[in-house]
Image (tube, rainbow, N blue to C red):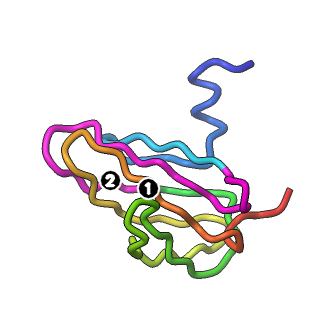
Amino acid sequence: VVTPEQAGQLTPTRTSANGNAWGFIDQEDRLVVLVSNLARGESAVQLDLAGLVDGTYTPTDALTGAAVATVAVSGGRGRLIVNVADYDTRALVFPATAVAQR
């Protein structure tokens, strides 16, 4: 068990001040990241990810299946900006090839 502060230091998912993000590996070994907008009005939330396999990936929106962005991962780190509506949450799915096997 860790404190919220300790968990924040361990997380491979970080966002800009106007967002929150949580990630998990689903049953198909894909990375699913939930990105929430904590601000009034649409926000461009910057998402910084770590612990990924180097390469270029196109995460998809879990609800629509649409491509969200292209993310270049180098040194295990990648960054993208996601537009999220007023107090909304989006679910992004990265392919299993992006996930480092542990």
User: How far across and how far down the image is residue 35, in percent?
Assistant: 41, 48
> In the visual, does 22 lie left or right of 98?
left
Residue corresponding to mark 2: 45
Q: How dense is the environment of label 2, judged by Cα within 10 Å: few (below 14), some, or many (20 and up)?
A: many
The dot on residue 47 is 1
Q: Image quadrant of residue 102?
A: bottom right
Residue 18's x, y, as percent?
29, 42
Q: Residue at position x 46%, y 61% from top?
A: 62
Q: Quadrant location of the N terminus?
A: top right
Position of 18 compared to 102: left or right? left
Please state the extent of the stretch shown in magenta in the rendering.
25-47
Q: Is residue 64 magenta?
A: no
Pointer 1 local density, CA inside 10 Å: few below 14, some 14–19, many at least 20? some
Local secondary structure at mark 1: strand
Q: Percent x, y for residue 36? A: 36, 43
Return the residue found at the far left.
41
Residue 74 x %, y %? 62, 74
Amino acid at dot 1: Leu
Residue kind at label 2, given as amino acid type: Val
Answer whether residue 39 is magenta in the image. yes
